[in-house]
Image (cartoon, grey):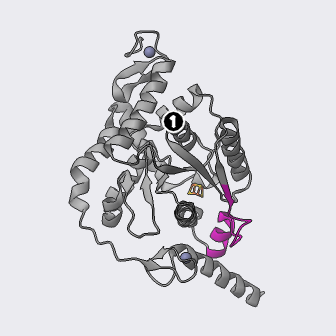
């Protein structure tokens, strides 16, 4: 098997693109794909400061690495979710990555700062699935860090597999408001929100894992313990079976939706946003979703003490 670009011996075969590359050409292909996604979707420009949300996993670290190499002005943000050994290991990987490259990384440990609530505590107190609480917490802290840090853009490492699984879930349940928002660039709907972008939306998990490996990026390999049994994984497995039989299906599913499906969902209602009375971030009611959740934890704890 020969590299499609330079005809040397290929080490990576990408069936979805019907191509194969040697190491330097794959690195070039990966970075060029990221750059094309950024340019075509008008995600950001070279003069803008970009906050990259990193989890310590392969996707977000591969994204950060590619952005730095492509000459973008970046800083990292790591959210310590307080999920035991998994959080400790992923924080160590994110810190080591930034240290080795002399990059600036802000670490926000949820269980030590401000409300002092890690995800397991919130999930246990409110009896919610951890991923639901986690989503609300991540959104709030990402939005706030980007706004307070004066960043015009927040970039996350969601890859093609994530996007395809999310699309499948939204289509299966005809989640019209979510379908209207399923796009690689979310423009702010409030002055305190920043542009949110997903430069890896066309890049598969296999490609980001290969890139991370070839670039010597050390990332946390274990999955979050709460991911087991998550619905997203069921969709990913189904899509992987489809991809195996019909290479390129995931990419076509997502990109055809964006070009032909998304325009049909543009009219989904989007209520006006005010500001949260407690934290000042955008909110649909008196409190934002995050502060409502924090208040619920407080209420449940008071009830538990009263009944003990
Ligand atoms: S699997 Fe769930 S709890 Fe774990 S990091 Fe992802 S969203 Fe958060
Ligand atoms: Zn080559
Ligand atoms: Zn709030």
Left or right of 145: which side holds 80? Answer: right
Residue 300 visible to an observer of this rendering? yes
Location of residue 300 with respect to 223 vertically, above or below = below
Location of residue 105 with respect to 29 vertically, above or below = below
Location of residue 129 with respect to 25 vertically, above or below = below
Left or right of 265: which side holds 235? Answer: right
User: 132 or 40, which is in the foreground?
Assistant: 40
Q: Quadrant of the N terminus?
A: top left
Counting from the top left corner in percent of width and height, residue 268 is at 27, 68
**Badge 1: how crowded within 10 Å, few (<14), some, or many (20+)?**
many
Extreme residue toward the top, this view:
8
Counting from the top left corner in percent of width and height, residue 171 is at 32, 57
Residue position marked by numbered label 1 in the rendering: 66
Q: What residue appears at the point 46 percent right and 23 percent down from the top-left corner? A: 26
For disc 1, does the CB lie below 8 Å from ligand 2?
no
Q: Which residues are magenta?
A: 107-126
Left or right of 4: which side holds 291? Answer: right
Q: Quadrant of the C terminus?
A: bottom right
Counting from the top left corner in percent of width and height, residue 68 is at 54, 37
The kind of secondary structure element at disc 1 is: helix
Counting from the top left corner in percent of width and height, residue 110 is at 68, 64
Residue 250 visible to an observer of this rendering? no
Magenta-colored stretch includes residue 258: no
Magenta-colored stretch includes residue 117: yes
| Quadrant position of ligand 1 | bottom right
User: 168 or 269, which is in the foreground?
Assistant: 269
Total of numbered circles in the picture?
1
Q: What residue appears at the point 45 percent right and 30 percent down from the top-left corner? A: 30
Extreme residue toward the right, this view:
308
Q: What residue appears at the point 65 percent right and 35 percent down from the top-left corner? A: 218
Q: What residue appears at the point 38 percent right and 47 percent down from the top-left corner? A: 164
């Amino acid at each position: 098997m020969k590299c499609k670009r330079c005809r040397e011996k290929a080490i990576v075969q990408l069936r979805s693109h019907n191509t194969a590359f040697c190491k330097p050409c794959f690195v070039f292909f990966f970075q060029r794909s990221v750059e094309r996604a950024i340019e075509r979707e008008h995600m950001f420009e070279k003069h803008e400061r970009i906050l990259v949300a990193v989890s310590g996993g392969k996707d977000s670290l591969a994204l950060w690495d590619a952005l730095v190499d492509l000459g973008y002005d970046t800083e990292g943000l790591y959210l310590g979710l307080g999920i035991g050994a998994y959080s400790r290991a992923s924080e160590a990987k994110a810190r080591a990555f930034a240290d080795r490259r002399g990059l600036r990384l802000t670490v926000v440990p949820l269980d030590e700062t401000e409300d002092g609530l890690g995800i397991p505590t919130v999930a246990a107190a409110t009896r919610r699935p951890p991923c639901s609480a986690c989503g609300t917490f991540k959104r709030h802290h990402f939005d706030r860090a980007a706004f307070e840090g004066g960043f015009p853009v927040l970039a996350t490492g969601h890859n093609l597999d994530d996007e395809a699984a999310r699309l499948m879930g939204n289509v299966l349940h005809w989640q019209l408001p979510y379908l209207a928002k399923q796009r690689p660039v979310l423009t702010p709907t409030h002055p305190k929100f920043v542009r949110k972008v997903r430069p890896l939306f066309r890049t598969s998990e296999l490609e980001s894992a290969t890139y991370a490996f070839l670039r010597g990026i050390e990332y946390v390999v274990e999955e979050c313990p709460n991911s087991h049994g998550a619905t997203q994984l069921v969709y990913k497995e189904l899509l992987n079976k489809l991809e195996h039989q019909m290479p390129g299906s995931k990419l076509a599913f997502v990109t055809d939706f964006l070009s032909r499906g998304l325009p049909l969902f543009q009219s989904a209602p989007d209520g006006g946003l005010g500001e949260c009375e407690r934290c000042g971030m955008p909110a649909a009611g008196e409190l934002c979703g995050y502060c409502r959740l924090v208040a619920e934890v407080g209420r449940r704890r008071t009830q538990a003490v009263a009944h003990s």
